[in-house]
Amino acid sequence: MTTALILALKSGLSLWESKESRKYIDKVLELEKEYYEESNKSRVDMAKLDHINFELRVVGEAFNSDLKK
């Protein structure tokens, strides 16, 4: 599910031509990197993955809010 959320946000943000889109893209890329680093560990910290997922949803909500403006 997290991978799908990352892909959806990256796709939507790539289509949005606004100066604010870069900050959202940077955050999504940072969270994507953290997600893959954590999920590839031998002992995965589920709390960290939950936090990454939460942050992705926050970015999605902020993106959606800015689109409505």
Image (cartoon, grey):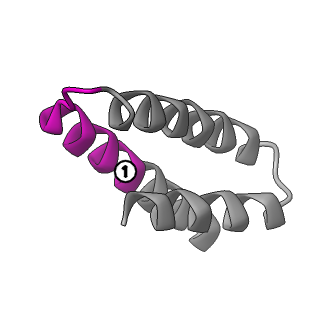
Whether 15 is among the magenta residues is: no
**Helix, strand, or loop for circle 1?**
helix
Residue 47 coordinates in the image, percent (x, y): 13, 35
Of the residues shown, which amino acid type is indicated by label 1? Val
Q: Residue 25 sits in which quadrant?
A: top right
Q: Residue farthest to the left? A: 47
Residue 20 coordinates in the image, percent (x, y): 72, 44
Residue 4 coordinates in the image, percent (x, y): 49, 67
Q: Nearer the viewer, residue 56 or 50?
A: 50
Tell me what residue is drawn at x 58 percent, y 68 percent: 8
Residue for badge 1: 58
| Residue range (magenta) | 42-58
Q: Residue 22 sits in which quadrant?
A: top right
Horizontally, residue 10 falls left or right of residue 31, namely right
Q: Nearer the viewer, residue 45 or 12?
A: 45
Answer above or below: position of 37 versus 54. Answer: above
Q: Residues within 10 Å of mark 1 (few under 14, many from 20)?
A: few
The count of marks equals 1
Tell me what residue is drawn at x 47 percent, y 59 percent: 3
Answer above or below: position of 68 versus 60. Answer: below
